[in-house]
Image (spheres, rainbow, N blue to C red):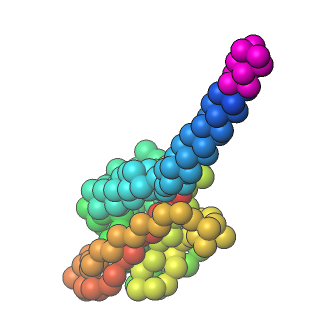
Amino acid sequence: MGVKRMRKGVMFFTVDALIAGIILTLTMAFLLSFFVDKPVVTDAKFYLDGYSNYIVNTNMSQFKSYTFIYKDPVEPNPSLSVYQKVLLMVSTQNYSFNTTQSFVENFSKVIIPEHVGIEYKIDERVIYSRHNDTLSQAKMVLTTSMLTFVVDENNVMYGPNVTKISVWV
């Protein structure tokens, strides 16, 4: 009789251990599921900061050796930063919209990897947008706004305009 009782005890102990293991596993899976789908803020912020710094701190004179980005051998305003040049291209009628769009597209390709979505706007007018179809499914969208104005070679001031740059992953 002692052996039968011992077998029953072992069986109940095994069933109890199995139930405790299942409960522990389900609890851990439930708790860890809260941490699985967090959007990666650092990637989007890294790209947005890098892009913003690039267009603010890069002068047009630095593109002389990079003709695939911008080819104008006689740039009238070599001291303009990139975002000022884009505003000047949009504000004056000297450049077509396609020229402006390709300029923004070319320097965006150099800075932002292909899998990252980006949108460049001036006063709610989209100048360039990449992966716009994924914007609605993005987990994280970061936007920075800059007040932009520029004075051309004839001392004509354009602006102030709001330049918005959005990056999403």
Number of numbered discs overlaid on the protein picture: 0
Residue 163 in sight here? yes
When the figure is inspected, residue 7 is found, relative to residue 27, above or below; the finding is: above
Q: State the image quarter where residue 56 is shown.
A: bottom left
The residue located at (56%, 51%) in the rendering is 30
When the figure is inspected, residue 168 is found, relative to residue 13, above or below; the finding is: below
Closer-to-camera residue (44/147): 44
When the figure is inspected, residue 165 is found, relative to residue 108, above or below; the finding is: below
Q: Residue furthest front?
A: 1
The residue located at (43%, 45%) in the rendering is 65
The residue located at (33%, 74%) in the rendering is 145
Kindly report the secondary structure that dominates the magenta region of the rendered protein: helix
Rendering coords of residue 147 (x, y %):
27, 78
Closer-to-camera residue (153/34): 34
| Left or right: 85 as drawn, with respect to 35 | left
Q: Residue furthest left?
A: 155
Rendering coords of residue 17 (x, y %):
63, 30
Can residue 30 be found in the magenta stretch?
A: no
Can residue 9 be found in the magenta stretch?
A: yes
Rendering coords of residue 85 (x, y %):
37, 70
Q: State the image quarter where residue 48 is shown.
A: bottom left
Closer-to-camera residue (47/16): 16
Rendering coords of residue 76 (x, y %):
34, 67
| Left or right: 94 as drawn, with respect to 81 | right
| Left or right: 54 as drawn, with respect to 31 | left
Residue 154 in sight here? no
Which stretch is magenta?
Answer: 1-10
Location of the N terminus (image quadrant):
top right
